[in-house]
């Protein structure tokens, strides 16, 4: 079987730049949605797609293994970018990959982009979102409908960032003639219902379906970039004019082979059979989002999507303050211990005499925990061997008065001796 395909990406009506990247080819459908705002989510997504597009050749038997390896290589490439430029720390991207081998699809997924399968009129979501709201849905705390307007609906828990090296979800499924596979960014699936996606995905050619999915997402109020990649399984080979396609931040190839060697032929042949020939892309505009489900939400979702962040300001100062707090607590503990020790007394030998010591009858390497407090005139030589040995070993006293009473007792024995 063969794969007929189409792809389109639109910056949307609010964003100033497109951080989505997509690719469609004879063997591969993939979408990466960059995260990171000021730290170049567009660079992360385009870097990942450029690595993943190397899968677009006839796979070997281990289709799932090839997908896993490509995703890990994309993550490694992002790690190299961050190592080369520390200012990129915090950038990341989702990745959803569908690799076709003529009889089956292998899918790799991380993040909140999605893959769907439309088979005999029935739509099935193939991937599982790695998002905070999806975890709430899984726990039964909110519904799918409530998740569309949840204030943290854009917070993702896993992505390719070159740091955490998260493991993607991996699986495969058999293909059938007539199957349609949609891989899209959350700008589409976060706005359109499953019923709406199914209706649009089933309509017309893959070109027509991709355009209508993007258009419908924007008309429904999506404030994000929107990318849709559509593949249709067919027993008929595609025409020679169908060539691989990069879209969004990674775009650098024409959709159709130029007619007569000119670029105009490629542009003019862009979505054949569609009623208007393009997406009706609206230039990005500043200001508030259009009226709709997201308009009342003041959160800038692009700056609140994924846990890794740009390096925080004053990080060195924070470390110094933290160390100062730890040292301060340690000093308080030591001071309290020293104060307690100076309220303790015991009797022991000092220069052949019985003496009263203040502190604890112990020591640490290089540190004495006691010192002579009162030196008496009681000579150890005038005490019995048993009493002298007891004094040399040290005699604890509950207080200074108790220590003095012990000394008086030995003084009396000395006199008797």
Image: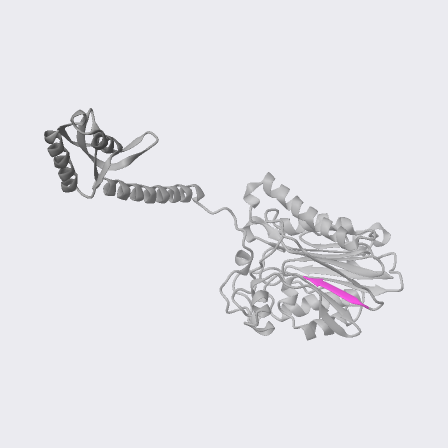
Name the residue at 18% across, 31% down: 355
Left or right of 274? Residue 296 is left
In the foreground, 97 or 300: 97
**The N terminus appears in which quarter of the rendering?**
bottom right
Report x, y in % for residue 165: 62, 49
In the figure, residue 281 lies in which quadrant? Answer: bottom right
Name the residue at 65% across, 48% down: 75
Q: Is residue 200 magenta?
A: no
Which segment did they paint magenta?
179-184
Q: Is residue 276 visible?
A: no
Q: Is residue 181 magenta?
A: yes
Report x, y in % for residue 407: 15, 35
Left or right of 275? Residue 227 is left
Name the residue at 28% across, 42% down: 337
Report x, y in % for residue 140: 57, 72
Report x, y in % for residue 361: 27, 36
**The C terminus appears in which quarter of the rendering?**
top left
């Amino acid at each position: 079987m063969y794969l007929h395909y189409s792809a389109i990406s639109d910056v949307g009506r609010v964003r100033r730049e497109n951080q989505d990247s997509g690719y469609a080819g004879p063997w591969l459908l993939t979408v990466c949605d960059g995260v990171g705002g000021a730290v170049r989510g567009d660079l992360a997504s385009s870097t990942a797609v450029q690595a993943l597009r190397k899968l677009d050749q006839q796979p070997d038997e281990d289709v799932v293994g090839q997908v896993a390896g490509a995703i890990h290589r994309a993550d490694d490439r992002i790690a190299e970018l961050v190592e080369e430029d520390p200012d990129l720390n915090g950038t990341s991207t989702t990745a959803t990959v569908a690799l076709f081998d003529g009889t089956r699809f292998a899918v790799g997924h991380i993040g909140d982009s999605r893959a769907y399968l439309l088979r005999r009129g029935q739509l099935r979501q193939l991937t599982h979102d790695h998002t905070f709201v999806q975890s709430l849905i899984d726990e039964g705390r909110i519904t799918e409908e409530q998740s569309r307007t949840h204030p943290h609906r854009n917070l993702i828990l896993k992505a390719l960032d070159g740091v955490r090296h998260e493991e993607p979800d991996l699986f495969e499924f058999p293909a059938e003639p007539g199957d349609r596979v949609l891989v899209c960014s959350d700008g589409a699936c976060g706005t359109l219902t499953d019923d709406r996606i199914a209706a649009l995905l089933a309509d017309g050619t893959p070109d027509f379906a991709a355009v209508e999915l993007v258009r419908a997402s924007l008309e429904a109020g999506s404030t994000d970039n929107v990318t849709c990649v559509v593949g249709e399984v067919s027993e008929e080979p595609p025409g020679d004019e169908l060539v691989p396609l990069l879209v969004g931040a990674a775009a650098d190839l024409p959709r159709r082979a130029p007619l007569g060697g000119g670029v105009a032929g490629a542009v003019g042949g862009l979505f054949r059979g569609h009623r208007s020939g393009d997406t009706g892309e609206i230039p990005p505009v500043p200001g508030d989002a259009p009226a709709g489900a997201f308009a009342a939400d003041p959160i800038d979702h692009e700056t609140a999507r994924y846990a890794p962040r740009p390096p925080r300001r004053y990080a060195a100062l924070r470390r110094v303050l933290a160390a100062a707090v730890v040292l301060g607590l340690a000093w308080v503990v030591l001071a309290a211990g020293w104060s307690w020790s100076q309220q303790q007394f015991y009797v022991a030998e000092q220069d052949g005499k019985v003496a009263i010591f203040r502190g604890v009858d112990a020591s640490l390497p290089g540190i004495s925990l006691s010192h002579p407090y009162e030196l008496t005139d009681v000579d150890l030589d005038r005490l019995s061997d048993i009493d002298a040995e007891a004094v040399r070993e040290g005699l604890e006293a509950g207080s200074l008065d108790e220590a003095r009473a012990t000394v008086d007792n030995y003084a009396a024995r000395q006199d008797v001796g």
